[in-house]
Amino acid sequence: MRVRIEPRDECLGDAICADECPEVFVINDEDGLAMVIKESPDESLREAVQSAADECPAEIIIIEED
Ligand code: SF4
């Protein structure tokens, strides 16, 4: 699985994704927007990544299969 946030400038900075899956998503200190810190997370994180995508109010978390 590959994860990205796009378009990132539509991020609301509410940190829902970072709360759901901190291994993959963090809020960038400089611009206050979410960023992906692990683009190819382990399958064990799939449920958490999917929850983040489902709950993202901006619907900008994209999950693709390798
Ligand atoms: S859940 Fe969506 S809108 Fe909220 S911080 Fe994460 S990427 Fe941004």
Image (spheres, rainbow, N blue to C red):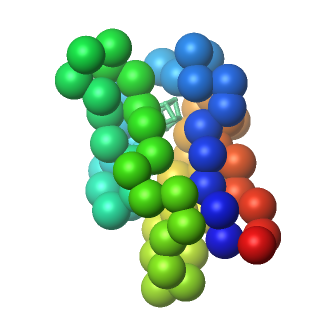
Q: Is residue 19 visible?
A: yes
Q: Is residue 36 above or below residue 30?
A: below
Quadrant of the image containing the C terminus:
bottom right
Q: Is residue 20 visible?
A: no
Residue 61 spot, x, y in % from top left = 63, 43
User: Is 41 in front, or is 55?
Assistant: 41
Dividing the picture into quadrants, the one containing residue 8 is top right
The residue drawn where x is 61% and y is 55% is 3
Residue 19 spot, x, y in % from top left = 32, 50
* Marker count (numbered): 0
Q: Is residue 48 above or below residue 16?
A: below
Q: Is residue 21 above or below residue 13?
A: below
The residue drawn where x is 59% and y is 32% is 57
Q: Is residue 55 above or below residue 48?
A: above
Residue lying farthest to the right in this orientation: 65
User: Is 20 in front, or is 65?
Assistant: 65
Residue lying farthest to the left in this orientation: 29
Residue 64 spot, x, y in % from top left = 76, 61
The residue drawn where x is 49% and y is 80% is 42
Give left or right: position of 63 versus 57: right
User: Is 26 in front, or is 40?
Assistant: 40
Quadrant of the image containing the N terminus:
bottom right
The residue drawn where x is 46% and y is 46% is 36
Give left or right: position of 50 versus 28: right
